[in-house]
């Protein structure tokens, strides 16, 4: 019999790794606390248009997981929450969680009355700032939990009371403040995920100075039905359909001045996005500038299929600079053909930068004594006894690998408690 003080497990991060870990641990009989910084569960996957290996829309997988969470009383989740402290030892950890105010409580039915009453707008974080959203908002159309949020800028404004009064269910509380919740858990799974590398750090590539240079995560939102353009891929500068699109691989990756490592998924992501363009615009021309194409295992079949499209040109070369024509807003890429050793200038309607995965632990480390590698990833799955890293906290991962890693971390957490 276990000597652990508690059999409960804390999972940090509500993306695919964290969801998988939480659900598997709970279905094995353990009490689980799931903590997510955003106001919704689903992580980066919720912001995709399609994901590998089946090129499904994200809610194919997320909806099943949300149903499993709703059906399992052993899972308690906190959104808009952050773990600020972990102390103790495996089987007996004390954890502090900061709960940030949402200003909307569980009485919310998603009726949208607060948004209708609100005139203040903010940049839409779900769409990476490409459009505006009311400051009283549902994070996205399929958000779980289905509950609105008030931006702090609204709470401090003159129209806050008007928005509060618009709610027929009295679900808005303008006096909400941050509070701390203390928990005791037996093990921790840390799956806080990743963020896109900051494209502004590559000044020569012209983001966001050049209006028609965007990043790969922004491209996903452009293609998504609930994105800023309702799924139409359009140039940001003028809303026109692009006739030529360039995908720039390793934008900041495999670069000693930025991310020195390969994020493993960018080649496949750009090829997937090239198919988005070709499906919408049958005559469009696509260029993919690459150092190496990394399509592993069964995904090589997808690479082979994409290469057969005569309107997609693979160009082995490193893009050194991107400039904008002030009149047309077209962008010109200066690139060296590394096979022929020649320099080229290629002009396109828009360019997409394949920025890499930066682990969130590189800026927001686990609040415990654990080791990291040179890039900010947790150095091993067992970061310390009783604390396990999963998904992109540990290594760059695709969706299916993240699910497997979350399940493995849950098993390790259960074993760690059982051994106490």
Image (cartoon, grey):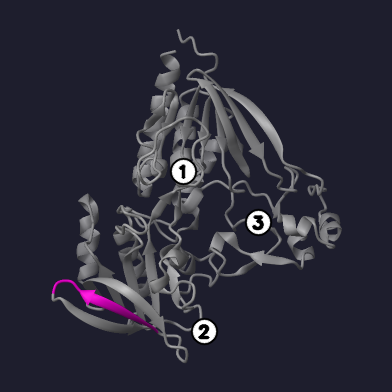
Q: Secondary structure at mark 2?
A: loop
2 or 3: mark nearer the eye: 2
Q: Left or right: 81 with respect to 358?
A: right
Label 2 and label 3: CA atoms lie apart by: 28 Å
Instruction: Decide which of tag 1 and tag 2 comes sooner along the chain.
Output: 2
Which residues lie in the magenta part? Answer: 331-339
Residue 108 screen position, x and y as percent? 73, 48
Label 1 and label 2: CA atoms lie apart by: 37 Å
Q: Secondary structure at mark 1?
A: helix
- Dividing the picture into quarters, in which one does residue 250 lie? bottom left
The label on residue 138 is: 3
The label on residue 361 is: 1
Label 3 and label 1: CA atoms lie apart by: 27 Å
The label on residue 238 is: 2
Q: Left or right: 306 with respect to 328?
A: left
> Magenta stretch containing residue 333, yes or no?
yes
Q: Quadrant of the N terminus?
A: top left
- In the displayed orientation, state which residue is furthest to the front: 257
Q: Residue at x 53, y 34 (%)?
A: 367
């Amino acid at each position: 019999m276990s000597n652990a003080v508690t059999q409960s497990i804390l999972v940090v991060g509500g993306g695919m790794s964290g969801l998988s870990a939480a659900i598997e641990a709970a279905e094995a009989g353990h009490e689980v606390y799931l903590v997510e910084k955003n106001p919704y569960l689903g992580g980066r996957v919720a912001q995709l248009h399609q994901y590998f290996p089946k090129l499904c829309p994200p809610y194919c997988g997320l909806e099943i997981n949300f149903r499993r969470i709703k059906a399992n009383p052993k899972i308690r989740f906190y959104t808009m929450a952050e773990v600020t402290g972990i102390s103790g030892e495996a089987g007996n950890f004390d954890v502090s969680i900061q709960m940030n105010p949402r200003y909307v409580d569980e009485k919310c039915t998603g009726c949208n009355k607060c948004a209708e009453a609100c005139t203040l707008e903010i940049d839409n974080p779900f769409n990476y700032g490409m459009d505006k959203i009311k400051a009283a908002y549902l994070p996205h159309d399929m958000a779980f939990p289905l509950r609105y949020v008030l931006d702090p800028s609204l709470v401090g404004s003159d129209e806050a009371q008007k928005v509060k009064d618009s709610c027929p269910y009295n679900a808005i509380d303008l006096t909400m403040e941050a509070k701390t919740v203390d928990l005791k858990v037996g093990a921790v799974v840390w799956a806080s995920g990743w963020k896109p590398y900051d494209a502004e750090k590559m000044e020569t590539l012209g983001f966001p100075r050049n209006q028609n240079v965007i990043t790969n995560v922004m491209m996903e939102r452009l293609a998504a039905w609930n994105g800023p353009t309702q799924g139409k891929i359009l140039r940001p500068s003028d809303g026109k359909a692009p006739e030529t699109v360039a995908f720039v691989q390793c934008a900041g990756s495999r670069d000693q001045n930025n991310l020195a490592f390969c994020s493993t998924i960018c080649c496949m992501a750009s090829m997937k996005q090239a198919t988005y363009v070709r499906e919408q615009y049958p005559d469009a021309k696509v260029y993919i500038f690459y150092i190496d194409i990394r399509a592993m295992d069964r995904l090589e079949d997808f690479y082979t299929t994409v290469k057969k499209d005569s309107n997609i040109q693979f160009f082995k070369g490193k893009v050194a600079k991107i400039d904008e024509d002030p009149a047309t807003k077209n962008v010109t890429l200066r690139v060296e053909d590394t096979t022929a050793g020649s320099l080229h200038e290629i002009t396109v309607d828009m360019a997409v930068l394949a920025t890499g995965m930066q682990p969130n632990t590189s800026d927001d480390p686990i609040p415990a004594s654990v080791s990291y590698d040179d890039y900010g990833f947790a150095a091993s799955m067992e970061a310390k006894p009783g604390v396990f890293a999963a998904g992109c906290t540990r290594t760059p991962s695709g969706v299916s690998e993240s699910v497997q890693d979350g399940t493995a971390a849950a098993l390790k957490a259960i074993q760690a408690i059982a051994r106490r």
